[in-house]
Image (cartoon, rainbow, N blue to C red):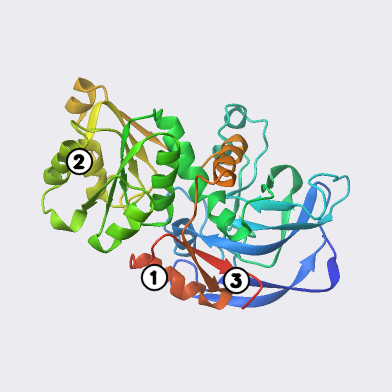
Amino acid sequence: MVEPLQGLTNRAIIYSAPGESLETAVVSLPVQQPAEGEVLVKLYYSGVCHTDVSFCMNALPGLQVPTPKGQIGGHEGVGTVIAHGPGVTSPPIGSHVGIKYVADACLTCDNCIEGAEASCLNLKISGYLTPGTFQQYCIATARYVTPIPDNLDLAAAAPLMCGGVTVYTALRKAGLRPGDWVAIFGAGGGLGHLGIQYAKAMGGRVIALDVGSKKDFCFSQAADEFIDVTQFDVDEDVAAKIKLLSNGGVRTSLQCTSSSKAYTQAFSSLCFRGTLVCIGVPQNPLSFAPNLSAMVGQELRIISAKTGNRVDVKECLSLAARGFIKCHYQIRKMNELTNVFKDMQAGLIEGRVILDLEGV
């Protein structure tokens, strides 16, 4: 057990009834002293991700146990190191760091050795069983926090801890080359708008797909083309429009939504040796069945991206620090998280929501 730090109170957001409702509550907790190998981080901001909604509703496939009542959620936190546990010297006190989806990985199992730290056999996940970033003070593994470049706005850095590194890793794994066309489904959302920017920074040309109300927003993120998916009744018509705009199909389809219909559209929009990258998980994971004849005949690929490793997040932050990535966000207070979740479920949010952890 670790002893609480004297004179400090930690306000944290907990899930009130996981699996039953989106209700959250702000509670006061003691601030804990970091143990060996740990640091204490004073968090200023935390991004809000659709995965947080899934943890709150026990809706993420593959979870071994339900999210417990009273769990502190969140996995896109940024702040300052304010205390070291025994034996810790780095990162130095006063430095800015980020806390990611992966709270800790062993770095020695076969998956970690291959760079797949998000699939570590001894994985700890922020906001699921491990206290997450919806709190003002967070204990973190010293070797696993991410240094934040000094010239990067802290609030804007928060969503890059998951959303940014996920789309960056997805595009890198897809083998995006300068001049390639990329179709981004759900382009007006937290993942999608970052996907537009990372694709452009990597030399790609982007077709953004979303509801019509997000057209101007997607163009403001430097999308080359936009398709209002609500204007098409047949999946093949969406794919045909993409192929028309891209002169035969896109090299990469980035699936940032959980829509089974969008998965079918994304797969059908690929050119020869194109790649469908799966990020969003449909509620029914078996609802998408690819055309295997087309897959073999056109030598298509289907890959996935859960999130990135420590190298990926370093590279993704470097692009942001150099001015290529500008996260579009709105600041909300801690006691607004329940409503934020509801707005996310309704598809009402452009870009990302960031919680200001210094104000309730």
> Which amino acid type is marked by label 2?
Ile
Provide the secondary structure element on which disc 2 rests. Answer: helix
The 10 Å Cα crowd at callout 1, few under 14, some 14 to 19, many 20 or more, is few
Residue holding disc 2: 242
Q: Is residue 283 above or below residue 136?
A: above
Q: Quadrant of the C terminus?
A: bottom right
> Is label 1 in contact with label 2 (beta carbons under 8 Å)?
no
Disc 2 packing (10 Å; few <14; some 14–19; many ≥20): many
Q: Secondary structure at mark 1?
A: helix
The CA span between labels 1 and 3 is 18 Å
Residue 22 visible in the shown view = no
Q: Circle 1 is placed at which residue position? A: 343
Q: CA distance from mark 3 to mark 2?
A: 42 Å
Where does label 3 land, which residue? 13
Q: Residues within 10 Å of mark 3 (few under 14, many from 20)?
A: many
Q: Position of residue 308 (x, y in %)?
A: 54, 39
Q: Which numbered disc flags the more N-terminal residue, 1 or 3?
A: 3
